[in-house]
Amino acid sequence: MTSLAAVFEKARSEDRAALVGYLPAGFPTKDGAVAAASAMVDAGCDVIEIGLPYSDPLMDGPTIQDAVHRSLSNGTRIADVMRTVEGVARTGAATLVMTYWNPIDQYGAERFARDLANAGGVGTITPDLTPEEAGPWREASREAGIETVFLVAPSSTEERIGIVADCCTGFVYAASLMGVTGARESVGLAAEGLVKRTRAHTTLPVCVGLGVGTGAQAAEVAAYADGVIVGSAFIRRLLDAPDESAGLFAVRELAAELAAGCRRR
Amino acid sequence: MTSSEDTVLQPGDLVGGDAGTGGKFGVFGGRYVPEALIPALDEVAAVYEKARTDVAFIREFDHLLRTYAGRPTTLTDVPKFGAQAGGARIVLKREDLTHTGAHKINNVLGQALLTKRLGKTRVIAETGAGQHGVATATAAALMGLECVIYMGAVDCERQSLNVARMKLLGATVVPVTNGSQTLKDAINEAFRDWVTNVDSTHYLFGTVAGPYPFPGIVRDFARIIGVEARRQILALTGKLPDAICAAVGGGSNAIGIFHAFLGDEGVALHGYEAGGRGLETGEHALTLTAGTIGVLHGSRTYVLQDEEGQTIESHSISAGLDYPGVGPEHAWLKDSGRATYHGITDAEAMDAFALLARTEGIIPAIESAHALAGALKLGRELGPDATILVNLSGRGDKDMGTAMTYFNL
Ligand SMILES: Cc1ncc(COP(=O)(O)O)c(C=O)c1O
């Protein structure tokens, strides 16, 4: 298990951005998710976000919705998410859980934080948990020794960026555009400005996600951000693959392309 | 602007008051949304906070309520229906007589005016029964706004008449095919549109659920129902009613009629949720009666969910009540004991639906029929001395397809 601080320290020393890959637990299958994430780490991902599949993913576009739906149909439970984290953390990559708030709320904040830490997870990203409601989760995470990552968006005011950044540990997640998750033709023009605005409020690393899917886009983002976050593009590869080994090959190939992009800053 | 003869809405009727407490009703409410939406929610809250005490805004809203929506709506005594309710005096608040045929128009006109103040040119909305969609499409046509309505594919089917109405009014109707293909999924899709197009677009939320400031704003715009009804029932009967009955989906018509009576301790407030095929079958929308506290669609409230927080799909014969969440103020009214919530099965609702049609010549919306079924039970409990005010939230034209199948017409 690597800490986020160590990940970004290493990337900085190699003059590159860190590569963060996202996959929902239980997709394409429970074991398949660990295999795919391991292949992604092997080919250059520094950090893996394991998505906790939720019935009402209102921040996600069609690709992640599709994967999450399949995962829930596979019967994925929180215990499976923890097992997935355990399997992925074993690769040595820093492993986070990305989740909507309600599953943590129902599972119990302290219990979730403790179980995640025990599974080797280093923290969470909680896209619909606003700073105003985040007190108990930050407290539970601090107790368990895990990081809390929150999002800033192009629409965020200076004041909000400051408030959100103050709640973050590990890194700050900058959403590149106004919209849901999903690969796009181009990375939002607002991203660079948002990263710059965020840096005025924090010394934490700032990673950019939403809409990144190619090596060229990774290189573009790596020029100004500390990390490049890619989700839907990996999922697309798995959805389009005719079988599991073709899927593994495809995500490995994409991770390598993105990792090379992160080094071309 | 102060003469009560000429106006339905008085300064002060838009009470607001949620702003100071961050949109919390006790532990319920709040905001659980992507950070990207926070500025838009803050903007809506700020514009509304100004508007609600602005005489020009109140005058404009009042004008629309009177000359476009057809307010005030009347009260109707229904003695033959009441005879089946233990002889209790049943009085209907006739929201079915508003333009477009349901209480939804009140909130929609208020928010359409807010949309103009926000400087936005496009509105989006979710709809279940199609009544909120029709009302939104109507206001958009009136005010020259672009309009997109998200509606679950299942609901498009069972409320096809309303889909045609929306299209005729110039709206784009997007059938939502994910999840349960009902109201919950339509709301998800509307949020996805909003976060993408928030610069041009106002999300014209249709019920008292969702993140702050929606529960308070929608409540205020629907509040006219109870404000009028309180005045009217005093004039009609010389006293306040013993009880008020309303159907609860997201909760807007119920809070709309309850709110002006919250301080009247002698007035019992009863909300009726969709019991579907019955609690024991698991096929119901008994959010307050059988749900647990969690977060859905940006708000802490009661939710139908499993122990890991996955939403459980609801069921009701009524599209407008087929929702696994509920507005946070109802969660608060339940926990504080001020209001009581009950379930009405599909069969009970359809019986009441037919009974009102046969006895009084009024075809209610199936949503409203849940409140009528509740009044039948309550009247039998309270007896012939009781006066029960029922919010007849909408008319039943849209439900003829369902009724034809159900009653073999
Ligand atoms: C006539 C009517 N009554 C009630 C409802 C339920 O909504 P709410 O609980 O917000 O009043 C609807 C919703 O579509 C409706 O059309």
Image (cartoon, helix red, strand yellow):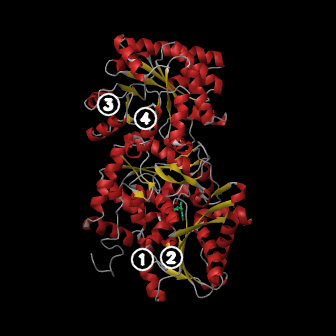
Q: Are marks 1 and 3 on the same chain?
A: no
Q: In which chain is the residue bearing label 1?
A: B
Q: What residue type is labelled 3?
A: Ala
Q: Are marks 2 and 4 on the same chain?
A: no
| Residue A29 seen in the current view | no
Query: How many angstroms separate mark 2 from mark 3 (CA)?
Result: 51 Å
Q: Residues within 10 Å of mark 1 (few under 14, many from 20)?
A: many
Q: Which of marks 2 and 4 is in front?
A: 4
Q: In which chain is the residue bearing label 2?
A: B
Q: How crowded is mark 3: few (under 14 residues within 10 Å), some or many (20 or more)?
A: some
| Residue B165 seen in the current view | yes
Q: Which of marks 4 and 3 is in front?
A: 4
Against B237, residue A182 (above or below) is above
* Mark 2 CB within 8 Å of ligand 1: no
Query: How many angstroms separate mark 1 from mark 3 (CA)?
Result: 49 Å
Q: Name the residue under label 4.
A: A142
Q: Do the residues labelled 2 and 1 touch (CB within 8 Å)?
A: yes
Q: Do the residues labelled 4 and 3 touch (CB within 8 Å)?
A: no
Against B346, residue B43 (above or below) is above
Q: Mark 3 points at which residue?
A: A190
Task: Point out the tag, 4 or 3, that comes first from the N-terminus.
Answer: 4
Q: Name the residue under label 1.
A: B228
Provide the secondary structure element on which disc 1 rests: helix
Q: Mark 2 points at which residue?
A: B93
Q: Nearer the viewer, mark 1 or mark 4?
A: 4
Residue drawn at x 54%, y 14% as measured from the top left: A252
Provide the secondary structure element on which disc 4 rests: helix
Q: Do labels 4 and 3 share a chain?
A: yes
Q: In which chain is the residue bearing label 3?
A: A
> Residue B278 in the image: x percent, y percent?
70, 60
Query: How many angstroms separate mark 2 from mark 4 (CA)?
Result: 54 Å
